[in-house]
Image (cartoon, grey):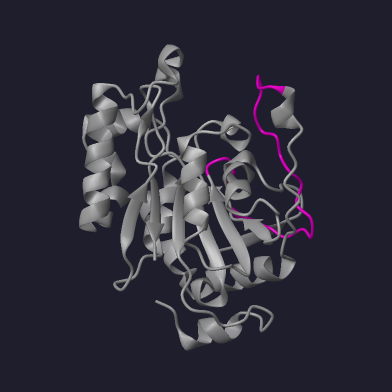
Amino acid sequence: MTTLNDLHSISSSFSNTDKMPVLFLGHGSPMNAIEENQFVAGFRDLAKTLPQPNAILCVSAHWYTKGTKVTSMEMPRTIHDFGGFPQALFDVQYPAKGSPQLAVETQKILDPVMVELDEHWGLDHGAWSVIKHLYPDADVPVIQLSIDYTKSGQYHFELAQKLQALRYKGVLIIGSGNIVHNLRMVDFRNFDKDNYGYDWAIEARQTVNNHLLNGDFQSLVNFEKLNKAVQLAVPTPEHYLPLLYTLGLKDKTDDLSLFNDKLLAGSLSMTSVKIM
């Protein structure tokens, strides 16, 4: 819950605002950064519905660390954390500013959890490849919060709840990953086939969507106890855990909706969540 002390603790440079939305974005292939497809169009359509943020805090699947860190540099670098893609993708830069001030405030809000101020990371493709479609002019400061790989789903869900005050300071909080994400089973021959998923992926998507739409977040927090289909969809947790940060920030007055809710290449999903 947001307390008065939380709100007062955040620097006055972040003006009080109406409550900001919270997002989970299925980011998919890094090529979404430069390709034109239905999912990129979905991100652009989403952007039209969002109030202008003062800053963005992104929890990306691709910053998976021991302990919790937050980027605190003035100008985060664009990280090309992938291989085997065209040079045009490596040429992309997303020159959004950072926000050292927001990093420090995030560190304070999450106390007593130890949060390291990080000057080395930057913006990985889980962040910039989707944020660039929301804010193509890179005119909104962006910081990233890492995912501590030593902790449980319950821990991450509860950690997210402590960030609630930022929603009232114009901070757009984004989780970026993929709910169904089994790279070993990707069917590259059918990569361009619309809404194509293996039977288990269809079942996993339906299971998770049902819990999302019914508000049964505790089952999603304890995802290791869900059916075999979900275990195939989440062979490792890093792409799933950003979803729990988004869900942890939903309050009783928020509505939850899905978009880009399709399967891809047999074993991936692009399902994204908007809470507002």
Q: 100 or 92: which is nearer to us? A: 92
Residue 254 left/right relative to 149: left
Provide the major secondary structure of the magenta segment.
loop
Image quarter of the N terminus: bottom left
Residue 187 left/right relative to 95: left
Up/down of 162 relative to 260, above or below: below
Residue that protrudes farthest toward the right in the picture:
74
Magenta segment boundaries in residue numbering: 61-86
Up/down of 173 relative to 90, above or below: below
Q: 27 or 260: which is nearer to us? A: 260
Name the residue: 37% across, 26% down. 194
Name the residue: 52% across, 40% down. 40
Up/down of 101 relative to 187, above or below: below
Residue 247 left/right relative to 107: left
Name the residue: 44% across, 11% down. 189
Q: 158 or 199: which is nearer to us? A: 199
Q: Position of residue 243 (x, y in %)?
A: 41, 50
Q: Position of residue 165 (x, y in %)?
A: 50, 75
Name the residue: 56% across, 76% down. 169
Q: Is 80 a magenta residue?
A: yes
Q: Position of residue 215 (x, y in %)?
A: 24, 58
Q: Is residue 176 visible from the viewing direction of this image? A: no
Q: Is 67 a magenta residue?
A: yes
Residue 79 left/right relative to 228: right
Q: Is residue 191 visible from the viewing direction of this image? A: yes
Image quarter of the C terminus: bottom left
Q: Position of residue 239 (x, y in %)?
A: 46, 39
